[in-house]
Image (spheres, rainbow, N blue to C red):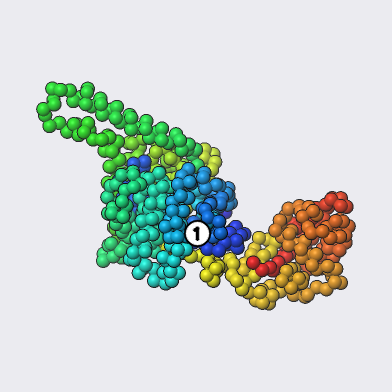
Amino acid sequence: MSERIQMNTKSLQKHFPDVYSDFFSKNDLVVSGCFNFPWNPRWWLHASKYTPIKNKIPMKCYIWFKIKKERGISFKSILFFDITEKDFKTISFLEISKEERKIIDFVQDLLDINTCDFGIEISILTETIIGHWFWFSWTFSAILVTWIYLLINKLKLDFLQNYKSFLNTKVFNDIKIIAWKLDSIFRYNNTLNHAVIWTLIDSKDPFFVLCENFSFDLDSKLESIFLKETIITEKFKNTLITSDISLDYWMIYSWIPTKPRQIEQFKRADINEYDEHKKFIEKEILWEDVSNYNIYLKKFIWEESVYNNFSDIIIFLNTKIIRLFKELFEKGFNNETINAFIDCINNHRYAISILEKQSSFAENLIYFFRKNRLNDYENIWVMPTSSGKLWWWYVVVMKPWISRETLVNTIKDMKNCYPNIEIEYASYLDWECSDWVKIEQYLSRWIFSSYIQKDKVLYKDNNWESYIWDYEYILKKENKWLILDTISNKIYFKWEKLTSKEISSQNATIEILEILLENIWKDVSNKEFSASSYSKNRNEMFSKISVPLNKLLSCSEAKESSFKCSWWITDFYVRLDKSDINIWIIRRI
């Protein structure tokens, strides 16, 4: 696992500083919220029918809002971390939700109700794959509505100072209900606001929701629907001895292709098959000779759908997960409870298999795990996060500590069959999180993120390192190698301020190196630089910048020069190669 990037927001910020720095440097107000880990599968029936169980994970969704003079709502491309590519990618909002127009109208109506005569542009950075079972839509909805309440001054900035009190206010309840409605649009009116609530609540511990049944109709009065959210450790606080989850739990990304349009066809086919069997029971088994007798099989012809009878098994298993969490927290590390817990995870998979044919992924994972394990005490329990033929993600639960390397070796073996398989989340590596909705940055209100502050400067080098700090502090601390100070237009080498004897034109050198640092290890055409004798003639560039710069660096401990100039006299390219010499640049944000 040494080559794996830890999947938490601090790790991703560390490995991709430019992504976050760029995101924050352009944005005024940035609000974030955590994603959730699912402890039970979801299927296609209306979400109010089951009892969801989640806990927070330290991966976040960041939403930036830019106020515009022109009215109207617009979404820019979403920046998301692709676990298979190990990099951030972009996707349009429309590719995430076909209800983009309805979402925009909903937000616009909310602004109009509060007499806002401006527009907003929304950018999103999310640390999970879009469409993930870590619940993008619900997290997005909670963050978006929280920001709007900040914008219309119904939510004060100091609400973070006493967050637990805020959770008991009418404002919090209003945000919860509006976010629920927004998510209902996003999820085609099939939602339960457990992830909306969980994004807003400040706890790392598992959490479940009870909700009365309601229709698919968005016009349902959600304000009047009974809904109660419960943190398990708080409910049973008088008997528990720990809040630690004594399990290793993982999210495995299979990347089994799933076509969303086909999912609906699969669902209808499953329902039709059960309805046809109900007719068979009625006409071929319960013939008229037994019509006057109390035969239990009649139950199946009275039910709206036989499918519901089987899906009730999953609802029952959800309650068992809650009971076993209670026992884990009451007994701590208890082998009997741990075995029962992870058996229950497997039972969820078996229950889904009754409802519909499953992919062979889980069975293959179990096969390779048993092949790699060191003893019979090691075991693995696997559950798809969804039915409805959505086989992308699987929850894996194991006894703590003993099987970590076994699972890593299992994933490596499975890459022959599933080349894009990845461990997207591992509890012992990626940790937990208790963060609620947070204001990461609000420049116009003098709230600054760690990436951009009014009185700070950006300090960045040719090896992808960067940070933001005080200008004077940087000049005192970073006193070695080559420093390009764009604020004073001076160049320093090992803290010695260079003169025209060493570099004939420091302004031109700084301008050229600044562009090269933005395109590190790439050939940059001379046409990308501002017009000067250096950019128009390769010999001038070579003699006035490249030669003195490389001469200067060669006097140090560098093994080779990093500044390269090639091709023709008036049509040439310049490049900064990877080097053991650090070239730093200081500039204002």
Tell me which residue sits at (49%, 56%) in the image. Answer: 61
Q: Looking at the picture, how far across and down is residue 173, in whole percent?
A: 34, 61
Q: Amino acid at mark 1?
A: Asp
Specify whether 494 is left or right of 163: right
Q: Looking at the picture, how far across and down is residue 211, in whole percent?
A: 29, 51
Tell me which residue sits at (37%, 67%) in the image. Answer: 166
- Circle 1 is placed at which residue position? 117
- Count of all numbered marks drawn on residues in the image: 1
Give the camera-side residue of 90 and 64. 64
Q: Is residue 578 visible?
A: no
Q: Looking at the picture, how far across and down is residue 357, in whole percent?
A: 38, 34
Q: Looking at the picture, how far across and down is residue 119, in whole percent?
A: 52, 57
In this view, 280 is above or below 355: above
Give the camera-side residue of 139 and 475. 139
Give the camera-side residue of 410 and 257. 257
Describe the element under mark 1 as helix, strand or loop: loop
Tell me which residue sits at (51%, 45%) in the image. Answer: 94
Q: Is residue 170 visible?
A: yes
Specify whether 190 is left or right of 29: left
Specify whether 327 is left or right of 74: left
In this view, 85 is above or below 471: above
Which residue is farthest left?
A: 292
- The quarter of the displayed image where residue 557 is located: bottom right
Tell me which residue sits at (37%, 30%) in the image. Answer: 269
